[in-house]
Image: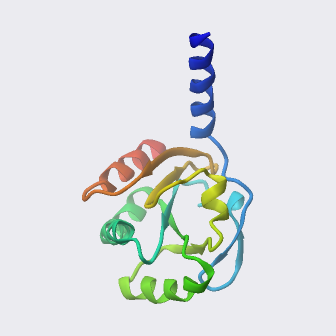
Amino acid sequence: MKRLFFVAALLAMVSTAFAQLPSVTLKDINGKTVNAAELRNDGKPFIIDFFATWCKPCNRELDAIAEVYDDWREETGVKIFAVSIDVAQNVGKVKPLVDNHGWEYDVLLDPNSDLKRALGIQMIPYVLICDGNGKIVYKHNGYTDGAEQELIEKVRELVK
């Protein structure tokens, strides 16, 4: 019985590790409607980074990535979608924060946490890496200084 449970748990983990993004409607920072299931990067990997304006580790992570983002794009073609989970009454704070930090990411808004909930995300910062077909191949939560190096290493593995 234990073995059966272990196999079932292992299969569940593997299936979610290579899951497609759920069909959830979001808006980008300019108000354009976007379906999360349709996020792509011309066949190249992309990163989805969940953040909030009030989350200090999130902002540190996005700042650290911003410092190397041009190099990452040149080397791998990776694209970053930063998804704000700020509630509706705080959505107006997102664009000023993005502009103030000079982040060149595609910023999406998830004010009801629909995408966050659909992916089973409990805490932020939370990062997903998707392959060129939009399949989730890596997940990570939390941020410590230097953790962005692990992200680019995972992306490099996808573009080999």
Image position, residue 47 (x, y; %): 50, 58
* Residue 40 seen: no
Q: Is 77 or 4 nearer to us in this picture?
A: 4
Placement of the C terminus among the 4 image quadrants: top left
The residue shown at (45%, 60%) is: 124
The residue shown at (37%, 52%) is: 152
The residue shown at (63%, 51%) is: 134
Q: Is 158 or 130 nearer to us in this picture?
A: 130
Image position, residue 63 (x, y; %): 33, 72
Residue 125: name its quadrant: bottom left
**From this viewpoint, which residue is outermost toward the front?**
1
Instruction: Using the image, determine if residue 131 lies above or below residue 97.
Output: above
Instruction: Using the image, determine if residue 138 lies above or below residue 10.
Output: below
Image position, residue 1 (x, y; %): 62, 9
Q: Is 110 or 105 nearer to us in this picture?
A: 110
Give left or right: position of 146 versus 153.
left
Instruction: Using the image, determine if residue 153 lies above or below residue 36.
Output: above
User: How many numbered tags mark residues here?
Assistant: 0
